[in-house]
Image (cartoon, helix red, strand yellow):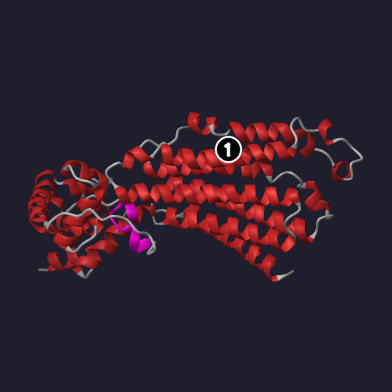
């Protein structure tokens, strides 16, 4: 096995590992994590098949899986679209919508099903032109491949166009959406480039590997942007995540900052917004009648905190009060964690120890003793 083949195998296993990590990851948008986990798993399988085809083109396993790669390729576009929608939209895809996006994979499966169930010997006879492939598939593989490339590019474009209006006033999130959609679009274009060069005989096997690696890089970048979505979504500057990014900064003057600081404090304290476990920076921005970026600027510059640190500070202060209040004495630690806005006991314990220096249990015991 040569160096490039080894690199691709390592990339495939990395895709499997990251897929498992996302599948069991409890933080972030769970449904989006699951969708991208499926995507990466299929992509890893696709790479394994490609390398096996190059190394052992005449093996029975490779022959039995011939043309099967059309199925994962038909799923890449729908999975990416659903992934982006799940990340940026409050309305998650329902079963009916998911089924709608399964139409293309179902059509591909229908087109090749008679071929897939053939024996390895029969598939070998088709490869050797002893049997007519037209007797087993409705539409030729080349036409299906071009259709899938067009479909994947359309999904990349559609992911951007259907969601960009959500970020009209938020240049950073709009740029994030443009970057992740464009990166996936380049992934589809790299497939088109590979197929065109292969058909014209302009590439040899080593260049074939290089293009596959390039496709892997595009998927890696897409995963990178997706992994940091929550950071950008909650106020982290995109240039800190991806330093080469350049964008026009639209900040607030110091005098305006002070006015909005007062408004923010009044909003948080009078309405106890921190008690809402699903509170997001975007929600706060809407109440402030500001962009997400400017709301983040107020929190960062006026309080030297991130959005989550700012909200958690209020939650911990409320938890302190409840832990020493006689009327809340019967509540256990987990109940208090949920009461003050945390989604789980572990996050509460970590945040409490960060701000107070001891665990909630130790804090309660110390105050009971005194």
Query: Does residue 368 appear to the left or right of 308 in the view shown?
Result: left
Write down the quadrant of residue 55 in the picture. bottom right
Confirm whether the magenta stretch covers residue 236.
yes
Observer-nearest of 274 and 360: 274
Tell me where residue 285 appears, x and y as whole percent.
21, 45
Query: Does residue 335 appear to the left or right of 177 in the view shown?
Result: left
Write down the quadrant of residue 130 in the picture. top right
Confirm whether the magenta stretch covers residue 350.
no
Which residue does the numbered mark 1 point to in the structure image?
151
Q: Is residue 225 above or below residue 278?
A: below
Give the residue displayed 48% in from the left and 49% down from the top.
Answer: 182
Mark 1 falls on what kind of element? helix
If the image is split into quadrants, where does the C terminus sit?
bottom left
Q: Is residue 264 above or below residue 246?
A: above
Tell me where residue 42 appears, x and y as whole percent.
61, 49
Tell me where residue 189 appears, x and y as whole percent.
58, 48
Res 115 seen here: yes
Res 279 seen here: no
Q: Residues within 10 Å of mark 1 (few under 14, many from 20)?
A: some
Observer-nearest of 39 and 249: 249
Tell me where residue 158 appears, x and y as whole percent.
47, 38
The mark tally for this picture is 1
Q: Which residues are magenta?
A: 232-241
Magenta: predominant secondary structure element?
A: helix
If the image is split into quadrants, where does the N terminus sit?
bottom right
Query: Does residue 120 appear to the left or right of 148 in the view shown?
Result: right
Q: Is residue 134 above or below residue 152?
A: above
Give the residue displayed 46% in from the left and 47% down from the top.
Answer: 181
Query: Does residue 331 appear to the left or right of 116 in the view shown?
Result: left
């Amino acid at each position: 096995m040569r160096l490039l083949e080894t690199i691709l195998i390592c990339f495939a296993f990395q895709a499997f590992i990251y897929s498992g990590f996302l599948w069991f990851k409890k933080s972030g948008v769970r449904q989006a994590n699951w969708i991208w986990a499926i995507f990466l798993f299929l992509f890893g399988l696709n790479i394994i098949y490609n390398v096996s085809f190059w190394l052992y083109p005449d093996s029975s396993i490779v022959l039995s899986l011939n043309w099967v790669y059309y199925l994962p390729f038909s799923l890449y576009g729908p999975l990416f679209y659903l992934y982006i929608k799940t990340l940026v939209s409050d309305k998650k895809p329902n079963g009916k919508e998911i089924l709608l996006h399964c139409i293309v994979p179902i059509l591909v499966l229908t087109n090749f099903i008679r071929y897939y169930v053939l024996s390895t010997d029969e598939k070998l006879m088709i490869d050797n032109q002893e049997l007519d492939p037209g007797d087993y598939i409705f539409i030729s593989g080349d036409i299906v491949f071009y259709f899938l490339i067009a479909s994947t590019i359309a999904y990349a474009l559609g992911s951007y166009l259907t969601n960009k209006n959500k970020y009209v006033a938020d240049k950073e999130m709009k740029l994030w959406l443009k970057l992740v959609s464009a990166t996936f679009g380049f992934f589809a274009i790299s497939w088109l480039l590979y197929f065109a060069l292969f058909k014209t005989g302009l590439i040899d096997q080593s260049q074939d590997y290089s293009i596959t690696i390039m496709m892997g890089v595009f998927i890696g970048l897409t995963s990178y942007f997706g992994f940091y979505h929550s950071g950008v979504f909650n106020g982290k500057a995109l240039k800190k995540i991806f330093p080469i990014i350049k964008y026009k900064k639209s900040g607030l003057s110091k005098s305006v900052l002070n006015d909005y600081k007062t408004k923010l404090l009044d909003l948080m304290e009078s309405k106890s917004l921190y008690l809402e476990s699903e509170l997001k920076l975007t929600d706060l921005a809407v109440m402030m009648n500001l962009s997400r970026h400017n709301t983040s600027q107020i929190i960062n510059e006026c309080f030297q905190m991130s959005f989550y640190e700012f909200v958690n500070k209020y939650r911990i202060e409320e938890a302190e009060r409840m832990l020493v209040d006689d009327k809340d004495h019967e509540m256990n630690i987990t109940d208090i964690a949920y009461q003050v806005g945390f989604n789980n006991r572990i996050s509460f314990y970590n945040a409490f120890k960060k701000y107070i220096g001891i665990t909630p249990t130790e804090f309660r015991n110390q105050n009971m003793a005194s």
